[in-house]
C-alpha cells in the first residue's frame, strides 16, 4: 500500500458535554498530528439515535474551537472522506455487512437481551470473562427463515475465527497479543439496524485514511476485535496507542466528586483555554523543563514515548496553577473583558485600568475580580461572625482614630499607617490586619496602597465608621 500522510482523529459520541477525559483524548491526538506535521480530523459518531442530540453535537464543536483544537478535516473541512457524521454513513456500513456475510464472517442472533444479561452475570459470578456462547451460530437456514417470517429482528454477530493470535504493536504500551478463543462472537449490527462503535469506528478509520488512533486504555480490548473486522474486509489497520486513564486522587474513576467538570462549565467559570490545554497536556505526559506554552510549543515537545503507563491523577490545584499562569499573561484589555459585565457595572470606567493593575495578581477567576470590585466600590461590607470578632478585638478607638485621620491623609495608606502607629502605638499584625479587614473584608489580597485610592476618602472613612460601630 502507498504511504498515507499521518492522520489522527477525534471521534466523540454527542451524547453529553465534553469532559476532561475525552478532551485529553482530542488534545493528545491533535498534539501528535501537529508534531508529525499531519492532519487532525473530527468525526462525529452519532449512531446512538436515543442519546445523540444536535445540541451536544454543536456544543462539542464549539468547545473544540474555543480550546484551539481546530480540525483540518471534518465537518466544514471536507478533504474527500466525508460525510463526517456517522448517521450519514449508514449505507456504507450496510455494504460492508454484505461483504462480511458473503465471506462467511457473520450470522444472525435472535437471543433476547434479558438472556444475554443473565448469561453475563453468571459468567462474571464464576470469575469468567463475559463471552457470547454462540447459541445462534448453529441455526440452520430454515430456522433462520422461520424466525424472520415470525417477525423477529436479529442482531448480526461477527464470527470470530478459532485458534488465532491477534498481535499488534501499541505505540504507547508496546507489543500486545490476544487469543481469538478468548473473544466471543460480538455484535456488529444491533437488531434495530444501527451499527455499534466496534464496527463503524474501525471501518471509518480505514476508509478515512486514519494512520494512528490515540485513545484511552479502556478501549484496548476493543482493538483485537476491530483488527479482525478490518482484516476480514481487507482494509488497512491503523497504528493504535492506548494511554492510561485519568483517575481521582483516590484512584477511582474520575467523576464530579473529584472536581471534574465539563469544558462548558469550566468556560462559564472563567477558565482560559490555554490553562486547560497546559494542564491536560501534562496529565499523563511528561514535559522536560517546559513551562506555560502555546499549542504549537506543546506539540513540538510531544512524544508518545513520554506518555505514562500509569493512571494520571486529576489535581484541581494543578489546574488552578495553570489558570493563574494564563491569567497573568492576559493584557490589561483582555483581563478587563474576561472579568465580565458584573465587574464592568461596578467599577467606574475612569478607574478600570488602575483597578486591573491593583487586583490582577490576586485573581484566577472572574468571581475573584468581582469580589475585589465589591471590596473597592460597594457601599457596605457584610462581615462574618468570625470577621466581626477580629474587628472588635482591635477596638472602637482604633477605628475612630483611623476615621479621623482620613480627613488629614486622605487615601495615602502609608501615611495612615504611620500616624496610627504614632498615636496608638500599634504595629505589625495588630495594625495591618484590622485595617485590611475593615476596608476589604479580607485578611489577604492586593496591595492596600493600590486599593485605597480606588475607594476614595469618603468610602474609606465610612468603612472605618462602620467598623467602629461593630465594636462594643
Image (spheres, rainbow, N blue to C red):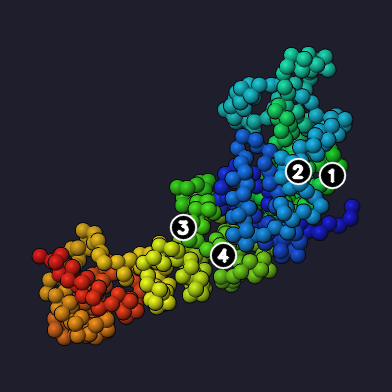
Q: Gap between marks 1 and 3, in whole Å?
A: 45 Å
Residue occupying the point 68% across, 46% down? 44
In this view of the protein, can residue 187 be seen by the observer? no
Mark 4 nearby-residue class (10 Å; few <14, some 14–19, many ≥20): many
Q: Earlier in the sequence, mark 1 or mark 3?
A: 1
The quadrant the C terminus occupies is bottom left
Residue 88, horizontal then vertical, whole percent? 74, 41
Mark 1 nearby-residue class (10 Å; few <14, some 14–19, many ≥20): some
- 94 lies left or right of 418: right
Secondary structure category for the residue under label 1: loop
Residue occupying the point 50% across, 47% down? 255
Mark 3 nearby-residue class (10 Å; few <14, some 14–19, many ≥20): few
**Residue carrying label 2:** 202
Q: Earlier in the sequence, mark 3 or mark 4?
A: 3
Are dots 3 and 2 in contact, CB under 8 Å? no
Q: Gap between marks 3 and 4, in whole Å?
A: 14 Å
Amino acid at each position: 500500500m502507498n504511504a498515507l500522510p499521518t492522520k489522527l482523529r477525534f471521534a466523540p459520541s454527542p451524547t453529553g458535554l465534553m469532559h476532561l477525559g475525552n478532551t485529553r483524548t482530542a488534545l493528545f491526538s491533535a498534539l501528535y498530528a501537529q508534531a508529525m506535521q499531519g492532519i487532525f480530523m473530527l468525526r462525529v459518531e452519532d449512531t446512538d439515535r436515543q442519546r445523540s442530540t444536535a445540541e451536544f453535537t454543536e456544543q462539542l464543536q464549539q468547545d473544540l474551537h474555543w480550546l484551539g483544537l481546530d480540525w483540518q478535516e471534518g465537518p466544514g473541512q471536507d478533504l474527500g472522506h466525508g460525510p463526517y457524521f456517522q448517521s450519514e454513513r449508514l449505507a456504507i456500513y450496510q455494504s460492508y455487512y454484505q461483504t462480511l456475510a458473503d465471506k462467511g464472517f457473520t450470522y444472525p442472533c435472535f437471543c433476547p437481551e434479558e438472556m444475554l444479561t443473565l448469561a453475563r452475570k453468571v459468567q462474571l459470578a464464576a470469575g469468567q470473562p463475559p463471552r457470547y456462547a454462540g447459541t445462534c451460530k448453529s441455526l440452520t437456514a430454515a430456522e433462520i427463515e422461520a424466525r424472520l417470517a415470525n417477525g423477529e429482528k436479529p442482531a448480526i454477530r461477527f464470527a470470530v475465527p478459532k485458534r488465532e493470535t491477534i498481535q499488534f504493536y501499541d505505540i504507547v504500551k508496546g507489543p500486545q497479543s490476544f487469543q481469538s478463543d478468548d473473544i466471543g462472537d460480538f455484535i456488529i449490527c444491533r437488531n434495530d439496524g444501527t451499527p455499534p462503535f466496534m464496527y463503524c469506528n474501525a471501518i471509518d478509520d480505514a476508509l478515512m485514511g486514519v494512520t494512528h488512533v490515540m485513545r484511552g486504555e479502556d478501549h484496548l480490548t476493543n482493538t483485537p476485535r476491530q483488527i479482525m473486522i478490518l482484516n476480514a474486509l481487507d482494509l488497512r489497520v491503523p497504528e493504535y496507542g492506548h494511554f492510561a486513564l485519568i483517575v481521582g486522587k483516590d484512584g477511582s474513576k474520575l467523576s464530579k466528586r473529584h472536581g471534574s467538570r465539563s469544558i462548558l462549565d469550566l468556560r462559564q467559570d472563567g477558565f482560559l483555554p490555554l490553562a486547560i490545554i497546559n494542564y491536560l497536556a501534562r496529565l499523563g505526559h511528561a514535559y522536560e523543563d517546559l513551562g506555560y506554552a502555546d499549542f504549537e510549543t506543546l506539540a513540538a515537545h510531544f512524544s508518545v514515548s513520554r506518555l505514562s503507563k500509569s493512571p494520571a491523577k486529576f489535581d484541581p490545584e494543578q489546574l488552578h496553577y495553570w489558570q493563574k499562569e494564563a491569567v497573568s499573561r492576559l493584557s490589561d484589555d483582555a483581563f478587563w473583558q474576561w472579568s465580565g459585565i458584573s465587574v464592568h457595572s461596578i467599577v467606574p470606567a475612569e478607574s478600570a485600568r488602575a483597578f486591573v493593575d491593583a487586583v490582577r495578581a490576586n485573581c484566577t477567576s472572574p468571581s475573584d475580580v468581582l469580589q475585589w470590585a465589591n471590596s473597592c466600590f460597594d457601599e457596605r461590607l457584610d462581615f462574618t461572625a468570625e470577621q466581626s470578632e477580629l474587628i472588635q478585638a482591635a477596638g472602637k478607638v482604633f477605628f475612630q482614630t483611623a476615621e479621623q485621620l482620613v480627613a488629614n491623609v486622605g487615601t495615602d495608606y502609608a501615611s495612615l499607617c504611620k500616624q496610627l502607629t504614632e498615636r496608638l502605638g500599634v504595629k505589625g499584625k495588630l495594625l495591618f490586619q484590622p485595617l485590611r479587614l475593615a476596608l476589604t473584608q479580607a485578611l489577604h489580597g492586593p496591595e492596600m496602597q493600590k486599593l485605597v485610592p480606588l475607594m476614595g476618602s469618603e468610602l474609606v472613612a465610612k468603612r472605618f465608621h462602620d467598623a467602629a460601630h461593630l465594636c462594643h
